[in-house]
Each structure stands twice: as structure tokens, then as C-alpha cells.
Amino acid sequence: MSPHAELVSRLRAAWLSGKTRPMEYRLAQLEGLGRFLDEKKQDILEATAADMRKATQLDSAFIRKDPYGVVLIIGPWNYPINLLLVPLIGAIAAGNCVVMKPSEITRNVERLVAEMLPRYLDEDCFAVVTAGVEETTRLLENKFDYIFFTGSPSVGRIVMTAAAKHLTPVTLELGGKNPCYVCDSCNVQNMARRVAWGRFFNAGQTCVAPDYVLCSAEMQEKLLPALREAITEFYGPNPQESPDFGRIVGDRQFQRVQALLHSGHTAIGGQTDAEERYIAPTVLVEVQQDDPIMQEEIFGPILPILTVASVDDAIAFINARERPLVLYVFSSRKEVVKRVLERTSSGGFCANDTIMHMTIPSLPFGGIGQSGLGRYHGRSSFETFSHQRSTLLRGAGRETLNTPRYPPYAPHRLPLLRAATETKRQTTCLLL
Ligand code: NAD
């Protein structure tokens, strides 16, 4: 066992208890830190002097948003245009040069982007590289100044490892299993329509789709007819004939999703057609935690329902797993929504709807932990592709003002030095 395993698990237990969340708690901890600086000032001075022998105004200090330089954007296949071009907008707005690498799986989009897009942009600064896994591995050997990756967590790890070789910063927009807790108090018909829309849109191949439902056994009984009704309303009696229901992107992905149908018991749908890569909108019940469908992101039109006894059971279930890209809660009780929001962690959070949170440009979009790193959309896209360059511009004169900070140090200079470096809070503290 690692020497610090016990320490880390102790802190994780404290984290899960929710104690670090209230504002009062955070203020109290910051106050404690302030007291440490005040009360131990002399000790700090002595220790830093022993270690390193070290002890502004009228200036212009600002943050300059500088472009990073040459940026690499790698896109997935599920929204192949959107997930390549939305980051590109941020990268261009921030002033970068960009290499784009669309997914090789959506071959038509890849060809279109590679052939057409460069004609609309300055080819000195913007390029499209078409590459499969092997060529992308070679592409990643190059030094980029920023890498923006959208795709699976496993490939995200590979990209981050390659970036680490050059200390290149990354944004990782990844996937995972997004839980959807349905409380006993909610409008079942509205909830069923919103969940069915989010789950079956693009045949379930959406990173923010609700991946599974957690609810009570009583709610499941009400939910099944409402979901059946919503699916029929959206896609007709036979979804295979609906022009509004999609197909799985490729044969390999079809085989993977089809195999997940064997978990639990099929309550709605379940039909497949390999030739068309069609999988009907499907709802599974009696699904167990260790069933294959609960081990990976579904990324297909299947919605498993798992029963839980209470909201606290749902919270424990969610917290026992990787942090999701988004967490959905359906409840007409504000205190239930608040409880789930406060006791869990996820990239985004959306109450009483699915997917819509990511359509609001003022809300940064991104994951946390296994679901990703960094954020974009709207202004956040510009921020993501900009380096915050802390800048101080001083005049070359007024040298007498600088005299107190130069050695030899003398006690009578301390008040002036302190005034110049004071940080305001309830009391003052001197940050060396
Ligand atoms: P993927 O990780 O297989 O591929 C993404 C990109 O990485 C592709 O361009 C691919 O060519 C490249 N790639 C694949 N293997 C590679 C390797 N070994 N080395 C270097 N590059 C490699 O993902 P996908 O199947 O295209 O997309 C589905 C995944 O993306 C799902 O997990 C989904 O949740 C996630 N996703 C996340 C978001 C988001 O915004 N967070 C959006 C869409 C999709």
C-alpha cells in the first residue's frame, strides 16, 4: 500500500461528507490561514531567512490575453462538424494558429473539412490533418502550444501523456456515464419526454445524454408507460421508419452497443437490424450495478433504469463512481435538487431537463475528473485558448521609491516596505 494511501482516503472521506462546501467553512479556513500568517510571522521570517536569506504602486499591472501559439484540435465523430469548429472559433478569436484533426470514422465529414475548409481560411495559419490512430500518434509527437481534445477518456489519457512530454497544456472534453435521478415528486410525462429526447437524440451518441436513470420502484412503474408514450410520440409506432431517428455510426460501434442489450430485462424496444446499424429506442429494467451496461458509457439508444430507495441512496451511488460530465435531476422539490447539487460533483448540472444546459453560451462547458479537464463555449472558448499573461509595466525613474527593498536591510525600512506590499483583509498580512 502506498505510504500516503490512508491520508488520501481520510481526506476523500472528509470531501464526501460535504463539509468543505459551505461558504462559512471556506471563510473559516481562509481566516485560519490568515491567522497563521499573522501569528507566525516572526517564525516565517526567520525560516525563510534561514533557507533563502530573502526578505507597487504607480505602475501599470494587467492581465494580457495572449494567444498560446500553434494549437492542435482533435475531434470525435459524434458531432463531427460542431466539435471541431466550435473550439476552432475560440482558437481563432484568441489569435492562435490551428492544426485540426477530425475523426477518421466520419469519413465524409473528414474529407469535406480537409478539402473545403482551408479554402476559407488563411492556409499559412490553419491546416487540417487527416489521420487515423497511427498517424495521430505521430502527429502528437510534435510540440504544440495547446491541445484541445474531444473524445473518450482512454484516448484522452494518451493525448495528455503525449502533451506532458512537451509540457503542453490541454483541454480534455471527455465522456462517461451521466446519471439521471428521478425523484418521486415530479411531472412524470414531462420528465419522460425530456429524458427520452436527451437519450435517443442522435441514436444516443451524445456525450451529455442521460446514461442511466435512478429512481424508486414506484416511480419506475409510472415511468415506463410515460417513456413508451414519449418514444411513440417522437418516432411513431416503428422507430426504424422514422426519419428523425438515427443510426449507429459504424459496424464496430453497433456490435458494442448491441451487446449491452443483454443486461437486465427489456421493457421497451430492444429490436436491432445489423444491416442498417439500427437499434430501437430501448429501456432496460432490473439492471444490476455489475451488469456490462453499467461498466461503460453506453453511447447508444439504450436507457437502463436502476432502482434506489431514496435520494441519499442515489447520491451514494453517484459518488461511488467517476465524476460525470453532467448530472441530471428531475424533481418538483427544490430541496431535493439542492441536496443533489450540494452533495455531488460533476462537470455540469441540469435540473428538470437534459442537454439544454450546454446550449447556453454564458455557461462554460466541460468535465471534471474522468469526464474531462477545462471548459469552453462562449467567452470561455476565448479564455481557454488564451494565456493569461500577468504584466507589469513600470517607469524607469523614481528609484528612491525602490530603495527600501534593496539590501542592506535595516529595521527602520520595514514599515515602508510593509506599506508597499500590504494585502488588504480584516487585518493586514505581509506576503514575502
Ligand atoms: P475517440 O477517443 O475514440 O476518438 C477521438 C479522436 O481521437 C478521433 O479524432 C480519433 O482519431 C483520435 N484517436 C483515437 N485513438 C487515438 C489514439 N490512440 N491516439 C491519438 N488519437 C486517437 O472518441 P470517439 O469515439 O470519436 O467519440 C466518442 C467519445 O467522445 C465518447 O466517450 C463521448 O462521450 C466523447 N465526447 C465527449 C464530448 C464532450 O464535449 N465532452 C463530446 C463528444 C464526444
Image (cartoon, grey):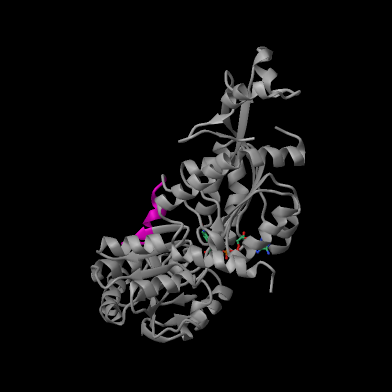
Seen from the viewer's position, the closer of residues 423 and 386 is 423
* Residue 169 percent location from the top left of the image: 65, 48
What residue do we see at 46% from left, 83% from top? 261
What residue do we see at 35% from left, 63% from top? 339
**Looking at the figure, which quarter contains the C terminus?**
top right
What residue do we see at 47% from left, 72% from top? 300
Magenta stretch: includes residue 139? no
**For residue 306, side relative to residue 138 (left or right):** left
* Residue 18 percent location from the top left of the image: 44, 62
Magenta segment range? 350-361
Q: Quadrant of residue 429?
A: top right
- 303 vs 328: above or below: below
- 229 vs 50: above or below: below
**Looking at the figure, which quarter contains the N terminus?**
bottom right
Which image quarter has ligand 1?
bottom right
- 163 vs 407: above or below: below
